[in-house]
Image (tube, rainbow, N blue to C red):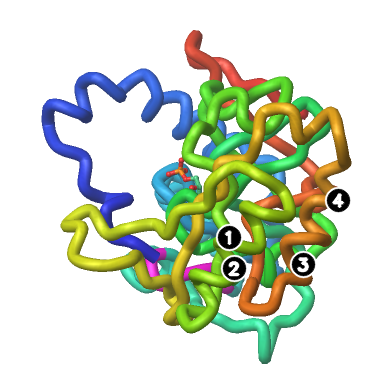
Amino acid sequence: CFSNFHKITGHTMNRLSGHEDAKRVAAYQAVDDHIKNNTAVGIGSGSTVIYAVDRLAEKINKEHLKIVCVATSFQSRQLILNHKLTLGDLETHPDLSCVIDGADEVDDKLLLIKGGGGCLTQEKIVASCTSNVIIIADHTKLSKHLGDNYKRGIPIEVIPLSYVPVIHKIETMLGGKAPVRMAKSKAGPVVTDNGNFILDWQFPPDIQSQQSWEAINSKLIHIPGVVETGLFINMVSHVYFGMPDGTFLHK
Ligand code: 5RP
């Protein structure tokens, strides 16, 4: 989706090197544990997935594997092509052996917030094509309850025509604030790979004690104009967290 996944300046790189190591550990372990010969795999989006694709390319070349990669975004497609991997799609490969993807937050029930990079709709479609969704993340993404760590809110992809009525409906029905995500330049809204806008719903803190995330997701998805939400509920088989000491935590 967005090329800023690659844009890490020298200064930020130093500050984040611990996080980068943690992402790498999680990504390498997931690839080593789950990639099998003669399969089709989904490739997620974001900065952690870059390490997974590096490892995947290394493994394919070393072990002469035949793997077809299905992208979840423009960024993911570019990653696959840049590594000279075989690019497939859901038309020819609707059943995937696994999908490896990142997340913005993972709670202790393995519910996810995704879509920080704006690729949530294609990520959810691709994730729905396998029974083995593998999430890779650094330790800062782990939380007890959704929203404890990821403060930007739940990303919601909307048809541009509908964005104001959808904001009103979310705020009236569920509370909180749901601003449209603006480009860094502030010149206009962020536009997804599907030509849509993203709302980042900052939900009221007490919402989790009132209703389940399934119920909340169902209310959101039924608002006309909502394409998809970044709530991934009961979709995950494995999560690998890279830890600060260089080890990984597998859930
Ligand atoms: C994009 C996503 C990403 O997987 C999520 O934002 C995590 O990214 P990163 O690995 O860069 O932290 O959901 O829509």
Left/right of residue 193 with respect to residue 68 in the rendered view: left
Res. 103 in view: no
Identified at 71% across, 63% down, the residue is: 127
Q: Which image quarter holds the C terminus?
A: top right
* Disc 4 from disc 3: Cα separation: 16 Å
Residue found farthest to the top: 245
Q: What amino acid does circle 1 point to?
A: Ile
Closest to the camera, between mark 4 and mark 3, is 4
Give the amino acid type for the residue marked by disc 2 in the picture. Answer: Val
Q: For mark 4, what is the residue?
A: 214
Amino acid identity at mark 4: Glu
Mark positioned earlier in the residue sequence (3 or 1):
3
Placement of 150 over or under 201, stated as above or below: above
- Circle 3 crowding by C-alpha within 10 Å: few under 14, some 14–19, many from 20: some
Whether the magenta-drawn stretch holds residue 73 is answered as yes
For label 2, the crowd category at 10 Å Cα-Cα, with few meaning under 14, some 14 to 19 and many 20 or more, is: many
Residues 7 and 81: in front is 7
Q: Distance from label 2 to label 4 (Cα)?
A: 19 Å
Residue matched to label 3 = 128
In the shown orientation, is residue 78 left or right of residue 142?
left
Task: From the top left corner, tell me how far across and down residue 202 is, in percent.
Answer: 56, 41
- Mark 2 CB near ligand 1 (8 Å cut): no
The foreground one among 114 and 87 is: 114
The dot on residue 156 is 1
Residue 57 x %, y %: 45, 57
Q: Earlier in the sequence, mark 3 or mark 2?
A: 3
**Residue at the disc numbered 2:** 166
Using the rendered view, name the quadrant where residue 98 is placed.
bottom right
Circle 4 SS class: helix
Q: Residues within 10 Å of mark 1 (few under 14, many from 20)?
A: many
